Image (cartoon, helix red, strand yellow):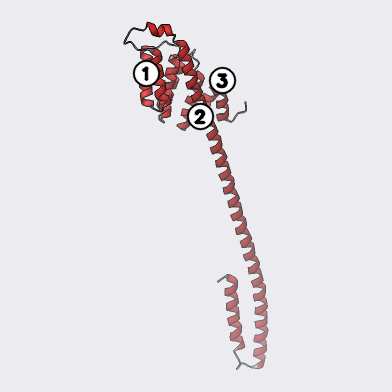
Amino acid sequence: MTVRRAFLALTLGSALMWAGSSCAPGGYYNTSQSALDSLLTSQAALAKRIDAMEKKLDITREGVASSRATTDTHLVEISQRLDVLDGKLEASSARVSQLSLKVDTVKQKISTSDSTRAASPAGSPDPETMYQAAYSDIAAGRYALGREAFQTYLKSFPDTDVADNAQYWIGESYYGQGDFANAIVEFQKVIDNYPKGDKIPAAMFKIGLSQSRLKQTAESQKTYKALIQKYPKSPEAALAKERLGQKS
């Protein structure tokens, strides 16, 4: 029961009590009737005020509900946009990794000639065969096997043209397993051990991604900025700009 209805019921009850006093003198009745009329008039005015207040309250409630719904819709839209952007960046990163795999294959075939392979003593490890076997494991998602094979490759052939690539894929094996801390360590070795290698931009970008995965936002942004500054024309620099929200 609303406040207005309760008040109406109370007033009506009072009115009936006044009307039922049939034994009262005429003058007393007239006075009581006048008081009752005044009371009913006041009650009607008060009822209108209460009704107006209830309408304002309903409008306020509707406004709050509408505002909340609009806010929720905006938040959902923003979340969806962020998911789309993150998906595009991850897809770009995946394409870079696939391209790196293809480049590695070409480099390995070029770096090892048929004569070199033919000159290898029987039973000795062949660098191209070892590299391709490790590469195949990484590409197939057998990260532990691929990592171990590349580590063995680097111990046997630390100075080949694709040694930096082998070190990079060791970092990639940890990244693929979600071990971002060790991934950073191994990617950093690409930068430290092969300062003239062409895998440094890719390693720096993956370090930035790994730091981002570890919620190290400041470090990640610092890495992206360093990558853009040192290798501004690299594909990884373009990806780093996207991560920082910069325009090319």
18 or 144, which is in the foreground? 144
Query: What quarter of the picture does the N terminus occupy?
Result: bottom right
Q: Earlier in the sequence, mark 1 or mark 3?
A: 1
Is 141 rendered above or below residue 50? Answer: above
The residue under label 2 is 218
Residue at position x 58%, y 48% in the image: 73
Instruction: Specify whether residue 201 is in view.
Output: yes
223 or 183, which is in the foreground? 183
Query: What quarter of the picture does the C terminus occupy?
Result: top right
Q: Earlier in the sequence, mark 3 or mark 2?
A: 2
Residue at position x 64%, y 68% in the image: 51
| Amino acid tagged 2 | Ala
Task: Determine the CA span between mark 1 and mark 3.
Answer: 27 Å
Is 138 rendered above or below residue 47? Answer: above
Residue at position x 60%, y 85% in the image: 16
Task: Determine the CA span between mark 1 and mark 2.
Answer: 31 Å
Q: Secondary structure at mark 3?
A: loop
Q: Position of residue 241 (x, y in %)?
A: 57, 27
The residue under label 3 is 234
148 or 121, which is in the foreground? 121
Residue 23, picture quadrant: bottom right
Residue at position x 35%, y 21% in the image: 148
| Amino acid tagged 3 | Ser
Instruction: Specify whether residue 189 is in view.
Output: no
| Amino acid tagged 1 | Gln
Q: Single out the mark in the foreground, 3 or 2.
A: 3
Is 2 rendered above or below residue 138? Answer: below
Q: Position of residue 227 (x, y in %)?
A: 54, 21
The residue under label 1 is 151
Q: Position of residue 224 (x, y in %)?
A: 53, 25
